[in-house]
Image (cartoon, helix red, strand yellow):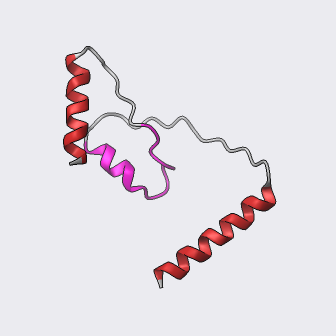
C-alpha cells in the first residue's frame, strides 16, 4: 500500500510539471535505516546535507538516552 501511494504521488508530480520530490531525511549514512531502503526503491539520488544538534539540557539528554537503551534491551529479551 505504501508503494502504491508513493507511485500515485510521483505520477501526479510528473503530470503537473514537478521535477524534484524530496522524500525527507534518510538517516545517518553509516547506520542502518529501513526508511532509506524504502525510499531507495524509487530511484533518485541520495543527498546528504549533514546533521546538527543543539542540546539545551545535556544532563537530561544523557539520562533519556540511557533510559532508551535500557528499555530497548529489556524489550529485546
| Residue 29 is inside the magenta segment | yes
- Residue closest to the eye, 41 or 56: 56
Q: Position of residue 71 (x, y in %)?
A: 57, 75
Circle count? 0
Taking 49 as reference, is 18 above or below it? Answer: above
Q: Position of residue 30 (x, y in %)?
A: 49, 54
Q: Is residue 30 left or right of residue 46?
A: right
Residue located 22% across and 45% down the image: 3
Query: What is the magenta range?
Result: 24-41
The outermost residue toward the top is 17
Residue located 73% across and 59% down the image: 61
| Residue 14 is inside the magenta segment | no
Q: Position of residue 4 (x, y in %)?
A: 19, 42
Residue 6 sits in quarter = top left
The outermost residue toward the bottom is 77
Q: Is residue 16 left or right of residue 60?
A: left
Residue located 73% across and 44% down the image: 54
- Residue closest to the eye, 68 or 35: 68
Which secondary structure type mostly characterizes the magenta part of the structure? loop
Amino acid at each position: 500500500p505504501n508503494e502504491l501511494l508513493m507511485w500515485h504521488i510521483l505520477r501526479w508530480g510528473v503530470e503537473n510539471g514537478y521535477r524534484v520530490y524530496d522524500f525527507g531525511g534518510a538517516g545517518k549514512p553509516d547506520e542502518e535505516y529501513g526508511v532509506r531502503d524504502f525510499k531507495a526503491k524509487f530511484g533518485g539520488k541520495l543527498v546528504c546535507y549533514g546533521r546538527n544538534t543543539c542540546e539545551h539540557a545535556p544532563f537530561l539528554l544523557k539520562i533519556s538516552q540511557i533510559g532508551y537503551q535500557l528499555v530497548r534491551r529489556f524489550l529485546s529479551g
